[in-house]
Amino acid sequence: MTMATPETAGLPGVAVVAIGRNEGERLRACLHSVVQSAECVVYVDSGSTDDSVAMAKALGVHVVVLPSDVVFTAALARNAGWRHVLELAPHIEFVQFVDGDCAVDPAWLQTARDFLVSRPDVAAVCGRRRERYPERSIYNQLCDLEWGAAAPGQTKACGGDVMMRAAPLAAVGGYNPRLIAGEEPELCVRLRAQGWKVWRLDAEMTLHDAAMMRIGQWWKRSMRAGYTFAEGVHLHGRPPERHRVVESRRAWIWGLALPIAAVLGALVVSPWLLLILLVYPLQVLRLYAGFQGPFRARAARAAFMVMGKFAEAAGQLKFVGLRLSGRTARLIEYK
């Protein structure tokens, strides 16, 4: 664990925790966007082999290096970050979490802090995350469409970029370090169970660099989503929360049950039962009709949303397999 000086000078009572591994110039942009804006900035590194740690120290950021013998997760890194913040500055009221591949909008920290001050019933607030280079690939564009689909107002969950009150975060024990993904919605479940609210503002928050240029990357990211659906159901799927039940059920049905039913039906009953598979292009058309925007974006979003159910089902199968075998889950990384 290493501390760097000098201290940053910015919004009183606000700290920033950035996490990353081998983010390179993306991390530099991330830290530059907050180093003068918050009272305290902490960077948590998960085993980088590039110059991330040296770069952060040179910018005057406090650095925490996770031990090499742990299973790296974003949840583990965020916990190390906010706990180190409170060691350095116990008076900190608000902690902005940001992934190392994101840059924070210049106005966001003030906007988020002011909102939390005005709403003592809200524990976490997030805003609009945008993709930095949506034009570079269809996969980047899909990310941007995903970020933009969330409506402002009270919500059930946030993403990795969020400002949280330090007190309720500490009271519920922070993020679940065993989760390889989906740790933010799971934390929000526990915060809401304690009576806190989660809010999304119609305000610019961060620029994200997905750097997804290949379909294999998109598949892994979708597979990771499916894994989190299954784990979410396992942890909080019972009423009244029913966390991730709907998403998990859709992945099982569209990604596994329907194709198996069509193939088995064709083999055992009649080849005509392969016509069941026509439900997939029909679903693409139905989704396309419900989306807004240019033709290419609508078509891509509809087609990849349907195809993504196969990857999500694979992720859920991975979760089931790990549970049955008792093996330790590892990160599903797409970069």
Image (tube, rainbow, N blue to C red):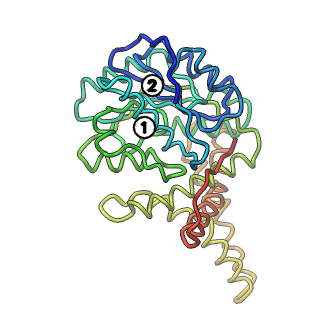
Residue 333 placement, left or right of 146: right
The image position of residue 263, as x and y in percent, is 71, 78
| Name of the residue lying farthest toward the bottom | 268
Above or below, comparing residue 32 to residue 234 in the picture: above
Which residue is disc 1 drawn over? 151
Q: Callout 2: few (<14), some (14-19), or many (20+) C-alpha neighbours within 10 Å? A: many
Above or below, comparing residue 82 to residue 279 in the picture: above
Say which label, 2 or 1, has the lower sequence index.
2
The amino acid at mark 1 is: Ala
Q: Callout 1: few (<14), some (14-19), or many (20+) C-alpha neighbours within 10 Å? A: few
Taking depth in this image into account, of 42 and 247 the one nearest to the observer is 42
Tell me what residue is drawn at x 40 percent, y 57 percent.
Answer: 243
Which residue is disc 2 drawn over? 16
The image position of residue 145, as x and y in percent, is 58, 37
Which element type, helix, strand or loop, lies under badge 1? loop
Choose mark 2 or mark 1, whichever is in front: 2
Tell me what residue is drawn at x 22 percent, y 30 percent.
Answer: 120
Residue 335 placement, left or right of 7: right
The amino acid at mark 2 is: Val
Which element type, helix, strand or loop, lies under badge 2? strand
The image position of residue 292, as x and y in percent, is 56, 38
Residue 127 placement, left or right of 284: left
Give the alpha-carbon distance from disc 2 to disc 1, as whole Å: 25 Å
The image position of residue 39, as x and y in percent, is 40, 16
Above or below, comparing residue 66 to residue 310 in the picture: above
Say which quadrant the C terminus sits in.
top right
Q: Find out whether the residues at labels 2 and 1 contact each other: C-beta distance under 8 Å.
A: no
Residue 30 placement, left or right of 264: left
Tell me what residue is drawn at x 67 percent, y 56 percent.
Answer: 307
